[in-house]
Image (cartoon, rainbow, N blue to C red):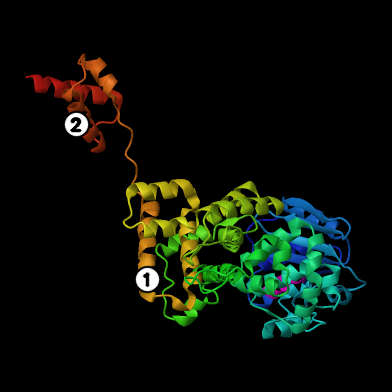
Amino acid sequence: MAMYPSELQTTDLFQFIAMHSDQPVWLVGGSVRELLAGRQPADIDLAVAGSGLDLAKTLATAGGGTFVALDDERDTGRAVLPGGETIDCARLRAADIIGDLRLRDFTINALALPLAAAIRGDWHDLIDPLGGQADLAAGRLRLCLPTGLREDPLRVVRAGRFRSTHHLTPDPELITMAQQAAPALATVAVERIRDEILKLCDGSAAAAGLRFLDEVRALTVIFPELEAARDCEQPYVHFLPVLAHILETVAALDWLIDNGEPPVAVQTNPHLSRRLPFAERYHEHLHRRRGIVRRAALLKLAALLHDNAKPQTKVHHPDGTVTFYGHQSLGAEVAAQIGKRLRLSRTDTAYIVTIVREHMRPGQMRSGGQLTERGINRFFRDTGDAGPDVLLHELADHLATRGPWLDPSAWHNHLVWVGELLDRYWNAPTPPPPPLLRGDELMASLGIGPGPEVGRLLRLILEAQQAGEIHNLEEALTLARTLHRAERL
């Protein structure tokens, strides 16, 4: 049986599937949406008249890929091919494809195209029993069935995800149903919730998706640690209470990273620059994949958690001031517990903990005056490869703090300051090579004791090494003898 060649065009992939299927097959859901938008789908979703597990196994074997059984009860399997393509195969859940589509979550997913029509590029055979194509065009998110959220409460989070990734507006009935279904999220497997939250945060409108979850009271079912932040007021320097500030910080990251919907500070100052220092490096850094999402998704999730401990650390002082001393340290401990509860990887949990723990550090460095090499080195030592992310979070936090009161000139200076730190990080000078010769080796070779002559010779030898005139210990010793002899003459 022919192996599947990697990195083929979508039509070739469809033909590969057709070659190995003896049952009717339809493209469904996200695959159809991507094709309608003129894009090649990254992953393929199939509905199969026969066994989904069997088809996935056949495709994995024929393509030299990997088979994954996703759901034995629903007869759903996955084939992961060598080029990275993922093909999910699910048996019809009804007597025919129209019945299957009517049982799906949202109308935008109740779309199907026979595989043969997809190969021909023929959209006349599109199956759309619930008006999903019109809903896509209108930017509207509707349920297929009024009972859809009761059947699977995870669909509440999926609604937030589509709000974030596809900029769809939930219709009033969906909002009402989501409010009723939200408490049942406590019964859903945490891994399913985690994956949907990560995908939501990977969208360009993550703040809008999270605000939808908060509107239907699902956000604090998933993150009960944030409930106390809802009505926690902040000092005058902030224009929002803590939970609203947290969501505004995510909105600022949407704008900075993905050119998403502008936060209030930008709505007030529409000409505010979003040109980050080292923008190209940031783009490469944040769009690198971390599991199923970009690194940027984890930064937005960290922003959602960054002030989680402010209510617990809030202190009113006799002079009328309010402080939140230590909220970043306590918040980092809470973030670690959340990462463990969501079963994030240790690496991803450590990343989020670093952002939460260090998010105040850049502001403290700025208020401390002139930057020092020692301070910069300590910052990047403590934050590692998350250092640029902490600085970007601080920019977003600043936008979310000042909001309509933002000073554009202060924002400009802030960008310049961040650029100075990043210049040390991304343009760090190449460290000099270790010296070829130590002082004790020099003294033993020449038979001399400690003194100024040792320092002089080591300095001259190092200069010759840096100039590329000597390259090894033997050459260094030869030069040392020559210099020492010349000094004695």
Residue type at tag 1: Ala
Q: Residue 357, percent across and down? A: 53, 53
- For label 1, the SS is helix
Residue 79 in sight from this viewpoint? yes
**Residue shown at 65%/61% (left/top)?**
198
- For label 2, the SS is helix
**Residue shown at 63%/54% (left/top)?**
291
Circles 2 and 1: CB distance less than 8 Å? no
- The overriding secondary structure of the stretch rendered in magenta is helix
Image quadrant for the C terminus?
Answer: top left
Q: Is residue 217 left or right of residue 24?
A: left
**Residue shown at 35%/46% (left/top)?**
374
Q: Residue furthest top?
A: 447
**Which residues are drawn in magenta?**
28-34
Q: Which residue was labeled with disc 2? A: 460
Where residue 458 sits, quadrant-wise, is top left
Label 2, label 1: how far apart the Cα atoms are: 48 Å
Q: Which residue was labeled with disc 1? A: 410
Residue 1 in sight from this viewpoint? no
Q: Which residue lies furthest to the right in this view?
A: 95
Q: Does the magenta stretch include residue 32?
A: yes
